[in-house]
Amino acid sequence: MSQTFSTIAQNASEAAYPHLWQGLAGVWSPSLGVTGESLRDVSGRKHHGTLQSMDPSKDWQASGGGWLLDFAGNPNRVQCGKRINDALINHITLVMWARFDSVASAQSIISTIASSGGNGQHFEVGRVSGKLSFIDSTSTTIAYATDSMTIGEHFVAVTRTGSSTSKTFSFFIDGQPAGTQTVSGTTRTDGGGGNFTIGRAGDYSGLYLNAGVRGAAAWGRALADAEIKALYQAGPGDWLKRKPRRVYSIPGPAFKAAWATRATTIAGVLR
């Protein structure tokens, strides 16, 4: 059954993976189709993004049987507003399905809780030898994945748990753990003044993403390893779909004409 952008969020209770809707702050899925100069939040939270320095006629691209939004580096980005930051405090999960065109230099995949004019807290790729990293607004809290990234199609994720002074970061590549690191240091835990941004480090003017994004999502909780794996296996849009409905049909008794029930008698009379 096909679904529109408006019906996906309305049917969360019927989703194929209903537990993945718990604590969901936003879902942006270019794979579901072209939405022009905006990037729709299909979570129902209405954190729609606006394309910045991007050309909708060129940056929406059909690829691999679906759609992606092409971020070709400086200064491409999507700003999704400030309200989403309020839902992302100490425990968060950020994920992205993308075709990474470069991993050699620092690029901000998703940035949240950004102060006006500052870096905010951002999830990066390629900061150190192509490794994923998570950096706070003052760079006092930096965590790195142990596994390196490669160019091409990947699902990447990071979860963060802990307090304002000590946090544990867990990284995932293609559904598999890619390193965990606990870091001490004060990080921002308030809404800040900047935008939640896909493709750039918040309101900061650098670290632009070089990738074709198929989907991105954020949670105000740390997803379990099994949930991360389920997201990877389902794909950028499929986990949002409804559960298959089972339709049961009990066949009625076969029709039998009244004369047929007396066929033996009739045949005997005829003989």
Image: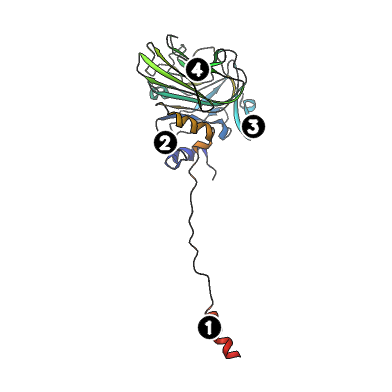
Horizontal side of 161 relative to 57 (left or right) equals left
What colouring method underlies this structural image? rainbow
Quarter of the image where the C terminus is located: bottom right
Q: Position of residue 135 (x, y in %)?
A: 46, 13
Mark 1 and 3 residues: CB-CB less than 8 Å, in contact?
Answer: no
Name which residue type carries label 2. His
Whether 26 is drawn above or below 140: the answer is: below
Instruction: Please tell me whether mark 3 sits on a helix, a strand or a loop.
Output: strand
Q: Position of residue 155 (x, y in %)?
A: 54, 27
Residue in the picture at 41% in, 23% down: 92
Name which residue type carries label 4. Ala
| Residue under pointer 4 | 145
Instruction: Please tell me whether mark 2 sits on a helix, a strand or a loop.
Output: helix
Other residues around mark 4 within 10 Å, as few (<14) / some (14–19) / many (≥20): many
| Residue under pointer 2 | 19
Q: Give the alpha-carbon distance from disc 2 to disc 1, as whole Å.
A: 60 Å
| Residue under pointer 1 | 262
